Amino acid sequence: MEIKKIFANANYHLISNILNKLLYLGLILTILRFLGSGGLGKFSFVFAFVGFLGVFLQFGMFTPSIRALSPKDKNFNGYVSSILVLKVFTSLTFCFLVLLVLKVSGSYGQFTWGILIIGLSSIISNFANIFSTIYVAYQKMVYLLINPLLTLVLLISAYALLSSSGSINALFLAFLGVSIMRFIVLFLITMKRFPKIVFSFDFKKCTSLTKSSYLFVLIGLGTALFYNVDILFLTKLTSFKIVGLYEFTLRIINFVVMIPGSLVFAAFPSMTLLYTVKKKAKLVPVFRKILKYSLYVALPGFAGLVILSKKIITQFMGPSFAQYDLALKLFFIYGLLLTLHMVIRSLLYALKKEKVNLYALLMAGALNIVLNLMLIPRYGLLGCAFATLVSYAVVVLMNFVYISRTFCKIGLIKLTYKSVFASVLMGIMVFLVRDVNLFLLIPVGIVIYLTVMLALGELRDEFELLWGYVTDFLSR
């Protein structure tokens, strides 16, 4: 039953994620068209700057809030009120930090308005996330389908504004407008479809959430030591064009990771519940299935990207960027590690072992900074890619070893050997016909991979389950 519930919610989250990622990738391509790779680099810098300080805005409350807002908990209003109070406090802290850094630094003059606009947008989104957290906690992820509709509004607005004015600040204003729309829509849905929210502040609950969140704040800082710090270093030590290429590459990685991400996102409430009621015998197979299905997507996805990296970069960024092909290959291998870490991390959080992931992130984040300082000045984007890959491998290895020794044997080879074989075979076939149009190669690779997997006796039950959901949905 847990697996079926996970897949049901994962379907909604996956549909939302696919549409959202496609539309956001369209936004990135729109920025490339009107502002060029340098403009995309500036766009990325503003979001990296705000995102780094945004760790204190989010204050690591997402996971503790899901745990607290259980449908079986009678203290719903107390927890929602406590989350609201904490978000007011973190928003004020965030405002102070942004203004302080802008004042003290004095070197971000051309980005001041962009940082202020996206900072305000982030605050509004932070409050809107209260409602989306409720949807996740209640496992009502159908309401997440509102996100791609809003992203579509953002894409249309961005295209219209950039084509008419060519101003990056106009683009940032579009983000602010969509954030306001999202808050209003999610608020109205929550008021109509969920338990009525009545403010009833409880100091003990507020203290409890704060104590359970501080670890996730540090984890957020550890995560920021990768993406956000990478962009800041690349901005300082290279050029905005290189930053734009980095952002484009990360968006492709996020697009591949979205399916595993949907599975993990949908599975986390159930994994947490199984651990809470001490049903390890059910939690272990759920974890292994989520890991297996995640790698079933990530292995062929990133194998194909590694083979086609040069074709991708020249088609979207231009022939002059072909020299960065090796850097892209390293980043795509990092994407596979990112998928593996995402699943293992969710289990650690369900087991309330956040400190394990925290120590790994902080250690690897420090290593990433050192390697970036050593390698970027000499090797540019390639040095950044190598630093990211090596340091993230440390995170995955530490978490992997901990789970294997203290909770269960993961059995990674047994779970994935068929997928590895199918991915290698797919990779060889794609390499042989790599001169074919890119948009034809992608479906060809998918068909080859699925055919091999079905021939090996895999995915048949999953296709039947998926078809059952489709027919059930169409019959409603």
Image (tube, grey):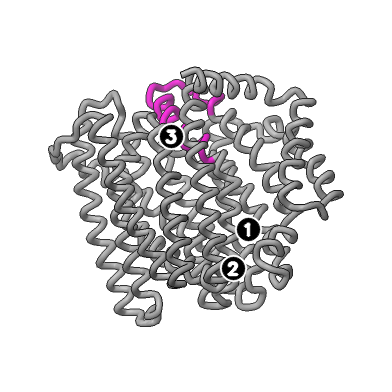
Q: CA distance from mark 3 to mark 2?
A: 32 Å
Q: Is residue 65 above or below residue 475?
A: below
Q: CA distance from mark 3 to mark 1?
A: 27 Å
Image position of 334 (left or right of 353): right
Secondary structure found at label 2:
helix
Bounds of the magenta segment: 261-286
In this rendered view, identify the residue nearer to me: 202 or 243.
243
Q: Say which mark, if any, is on residue 390.
A: 1
- Residue on which the image places disc 3: 350
Q: Going 55% across and 73% down the picture, which residue do you hit?
A: 38
Point out residue 471 in the picture as x, y percentages from the top left corner. 55, 19
In this rendered view, identify the residue nearer to me: 338 or 203.
338
Image position of 73 (left or right of 115): left
Residue type for callout 3 = Ala
Point out residue 350 in the picture as x, y percentages from the top left corner. 43, 34
Residue type for callout 2 = Leu
Q: Going 61% across and 32% down the picture, which residue do you hit?
A: 293
